[in-house]
């Protein structure tokens, strides 16, 4: 049985604060929909340029689905509108009149 080694690529990136902090060994990235893992990072050979050696990596669909669900839940929590509680009902009350009021936007215990 013969198994070919994973593909590898070299990538040249402009060296700045963001790229210098992001690219470290074993960092996983996605290029054109395919997963890659950083194997080595050369910051010294060429001033101003980072040379990154990437190895083809596997895709864990279950882990990806769990991350997607967590992200969706987080977005739902962030979207929740903030409503200030107020009393809903008529502003004018007549003598001997009966009016009904409701507190809107307050959660139980507020």
Image (cartoon, rainbow, N blue to C red):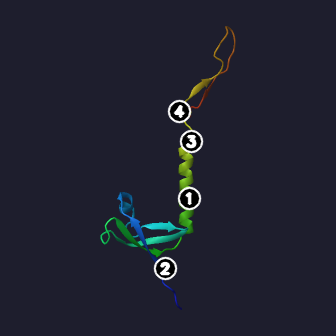
Location of mark 4 (residue): 109
State left or right for residue 25 relative to residue 8. left
Q: Residues within 10 Å of mark 3 (few under 14, many from 20)?
A: few
Nearest to N terminus: mark 4 or mark 2: 2
Q: Secondary structure at mark 2?
A: loop
Residue at mark 4 to residue at mark 3: CA–CA distance: 19 Å
Q: Tell me which residue sits at (56%, 51%) in the image.
A: 73
Q: Earlier in the sequence, mark 4 or mark 3?
A: 3
Secondary structure state at the residue bearing disc 3: loop
Q: Is residue 3 above or below residue 96?
A: below
Q: Which mark is residue 82?
A: none
Question: How many residues crowd mark 4 within 10 Å: few (<14), some (14–19), many (20+)?
Answer: few
Q: Circle 1 — which element?
A: helix
> Mark 2, residues whose alpha carbon is within 10 Å: few (<14), some, or many (≥20)?
few
Kindly report which numbered mark, 4 or 3, lies closer to the viewer in this rendering.
3
Pointer 1 with pointer 2, Cβ within 8 A: no
Q: Position of residue 96 (x, y in %)?
A: 69, 9
Residue at numbered disc 2: 7
Label 2 or label 3, whichever lies nearer to me, is 2
Q: Earlier in the sequence, mark 2 or mark 3?
A: 2
- Give the residue at mark 1: 68
Corner quadrant of residue 17? bottom left
Q: Which residue is mark 3?
A: 80
């Amino acid at each position: 049985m013969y198994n070919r080694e994973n593909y590898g690529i070299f990538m040249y990136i402009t060296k700045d604060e963001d790229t210098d902090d992001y690219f470290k060994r074993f960092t996983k990235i996605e290029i054109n929909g395919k997963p890659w893992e950083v194997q080595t990072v050369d910051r010294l050979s060429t001033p101003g340029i980072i040379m990154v050696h990437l190895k083809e990596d596997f895709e864990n669909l279950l882990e990806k689905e769990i991350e997607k669900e967590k992200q969706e839940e987080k977005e739902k929590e962030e979207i929740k509108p903030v409503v200030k509680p107020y009393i809903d009902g008529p502003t004018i009350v007549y003598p001997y009149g009966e009016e009904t009021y409701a507190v809107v936007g307050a959660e139980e215990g507020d």
